[in-house]
Image: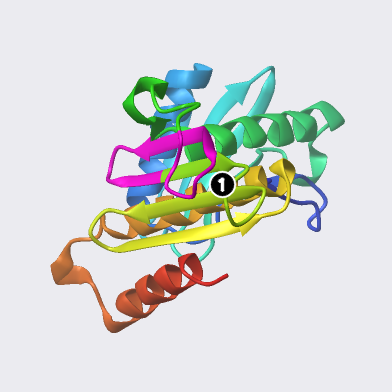
Amino acid sequence: MEIKINKDKGWSEAILDDDCEFEKFYRTAALLEEAFQGVFTQKLNDFDSLYWDFEYKGSSLILHYNIYMGISLFPAKFKEATVPDNKNVEELGALLFTRMLDQDWYNFEEGKTIGANGPEEGWIITDLENVHGARITVEKDSATAPFAITYGIYGLLFHTHYKPDEEKAGEYVAWLKARINKVFDMYELPESHRTEEWYHQHDRLVHELTID
């Protein structure tokens, strides 16, 4: 799964998440500070948008959030941005996107299950657990297909999907992590604030995770 880069406006904009709550923006900003030594020089906060300026490899960039468009990264100079400015947006965007995707996932039981037999009668090559309560297990040479991906969100869903080769299995795991992360992001909204639209979106995500 790859980050979306929009160049339609005349500069590079890295779309980190196109549908999320304020809390996801603050976690992204904290990740930028901790993992990439980002220092915010100016913070402009509106009721529905946030614009936080920082420097990266000599480029002035903006981490942006909007309640309708999500989180993105773009150069502060917009159309006057240099080629290095736009390249830095794309580079940092890709790094942030990957870290955001992986930050809550760890090897199940510290990797002790790798090489063991799995529930699909194959041998386990990937076994990941999310700190919020989910697991993804990939088996090679399963009884049903070359690669079996068994996954679940504890107390919510459990499913197995099959792929013909390792590349497609890896792509599916990345997609699963993004979708499962999105479910956990939704749970950050207090129950008292959850609308009918929230439940509709939640059910749609769960449905996406259980169809072949």
Q: Would you identify the image quadrant in which residue 75 lies? A: top right
Q: Residue at x 48, y 61 (%)?
A: 19
Which residue is labeled 1 in the image? Answer: 173
Given residues 128 and 58, the one toward you in this image is 128
Image coords of residue 46 (percent x, y): 39, 54
Residue 160 left/right relative to 15? left
120 is within the stretch colored magenta = yes
Image coords of residue 91 (percent x, y): 71, 30
Residue 171 left/right relative to 136? right
Neighbours of disc 1 within 10 Å: few (<14), some (14-19), many (20+): many
Point out the stretch of residues depicted in magenta.
Answer: 117-135
Q: Would you identify the image quadrant in which residue 206 lies? A: bottom left
Please say if 84 is above or below 50: above
Identify the image quadrant of the C terminus.
bottom right
Looking at the rendered structure, the secondary structure element under dot 1 is helix
21 is within the stretch colored magenta = no
Q: Is residue 15 visible?
A: no
The colour scheme is: rainbow
Given residues 37 and 128, the one toward you in this image is 128
Query: In the orientation shown, which residue stands out farthest toward the bottom?
Result: 196
Image coords of residue 78 (percent x, y): 73, 44
Given residues 209 and 4, the one toward you in this image is 209
Total numbered labels: 1
Please say if 152 is above or below 37: below
Q: Can residue 140 be seen in this view?
A: yes
Q: Which residue is drawn at 50% across and 26% down?
A: 115
Please say if 83 is above or below 195: above
Image coords of residue 97 (percent x, y): 58, 39
Q: Residue at x 57, y 52 (%)?
A: 143
Type of residue at label 1? Val
